[in-house]
Image (cartoon, rainbow, N blue to C red):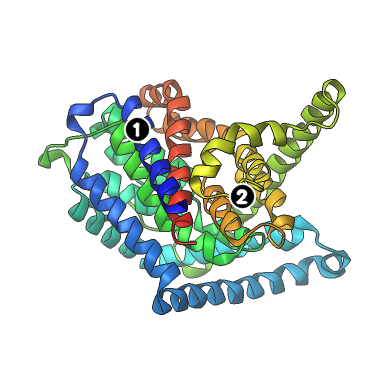
Amino acid sequence: MSILLGLLAIVIVMGIAYLMSNDRKNINYMGIIIMLIAQVITTWFMFETAIGSSIIRWIADGFDKLIEFGTAGVSFVVGDLMEGGNVFFFNVLLLIIFFATLLSVLTYLKILPALIRYLGGFISKITGLPKVESFNAVNSIFFGQSEAIIAIKSQFRHLSNNRLYIVSASAMGSVSASIIGAYMQMLPAEYVLVALPLNMFSSLIVASIIAPVKVDKKDDHVDVKEVSTSKSIFEAMGNGALDGGKIALIVAAMLIAFIASLELVNWIIQAIFAGTTIQQILGYIFAPIGILMGIAPSEVIQAGGIMGTKIVTNEFVAMLELQPLVDTLSLKTVGIVSVFLTSFANFSSIGIIAGTVQGIDAEKGATVSRFGLKLLIGATLGSILSATMAGLFL
């Protein structure tokens, strides 16, 4: 029964995307089918096979070791402050600095650019999607929303509104590798890792239905400057550390603002409706799709509230709500919600993406602002698709 509900959820996601489509005649159905099959194979391999499970454990162990290295650096600076309990800023956010440094070094050594080009070219070949969109989808897994978009700024003159939508959707539906370590401090590592490829494909699937593209070969080329501007590995380390520090402070500031705002909204709601919270209201809103995704009816209000919180605030706020419930909710619910949360699909991302594009091309920045809500709905559908796909194998 749960499999049938999951399949129904996928059909509903596709149906909503189809109704939102602005060019139904040019939808690349073959490419979409190929990406759906790729999702099924990826999820099955990672969850159901001994080799896949071993790979996940190996990658998770690798991240755990990296987290140990990062923690050593943080501990040296803050000393006994880390001993005084679970201080989120010290134990989670400051790890972003080390991961951003590592990312910067891998970029300087041209390891990441080569990997991104190879994977992007492979996805373009098997799906029929344009190279720029395919490259950007892979690039968005490793770099943040702004950085992934800036990497293809030389291609903006070739981007139609539909192509711009797909590029923006990939940026919103992904996460940055620099903060994956922070996610793994709050959620089970295997679900965070599975979410990365699933969300890449989901973003492309939904966006390709909403904004289909056909590109002439002469306009389908990648000319990106995905190389480090650092002159040495030490400069790369320094630049990465500074970038990571900025990200950590930005996330901390957003958490303070969003969590405080949630408390204010809940105080107002409870003054009117005693015992009611915004999370409960969001839980009821998300309950129908949550049940189809595979969440148990007894847990769907709580889980739906967490998913709704992520959309109106950000993924960190929602992960902090899920973290203490990991051991009390069922394994399937934790997996589905974790995959759903591992993306940048929230209201604040609209402004980040639109602002980045605005800095590259003012006209296209205004275009992104106009389809901002449509972008968020598409990215949310992508998160639902990824979480449902994971739920089919849990």
Residue 15 is labelled as: 1
Q: Residues within 10 Å of mark 2 (few under 14, many from 20)?
A: many
**Please, what secondary structure does the residue beneath circle 2 have?**
helix
Which residue is the site of mark 2? 247
Direction from residue 375 to residue 159 in the image, left or right? left
- At x 29% / y 35%, what residue is drawn? 209
| Residue 52 at x, y percent in the picture | 41, 74
- Please say if 339 is above or below 152: below
The residue under label 1 is which amino acid type?
Gly
| Residue 389 at x, y percent in the picture | 42, 53
The residue under label 2 is which amino acid type?
Ile
Q: In this view of the protein, which residue sits in the foreground, 4 or 65?
A: 4
- Please say if 113 is above or below 203: below
Looking at the image, is mark 1 or mark 2 nearer the viewer? 1
Q: Choose the circle earlier in sequence order: 1 or 2.
A: 1
Instruction: Compute the Cα span from label 1 to label 2.
Output: 37 Å
To which quarter of the image does residue 181 belong?
Answer: bottom right
- At x 40% / y 42%, what residue is drawn? 8
Look at the image and tell me whether residue 106 can be seen.
yes
| Residue 128 at x, y percent in the picture | 18, 47
Number of labelled discs?
A: 2
**Please, what secondary structure does the residue beneath circle 1 have?**
helix
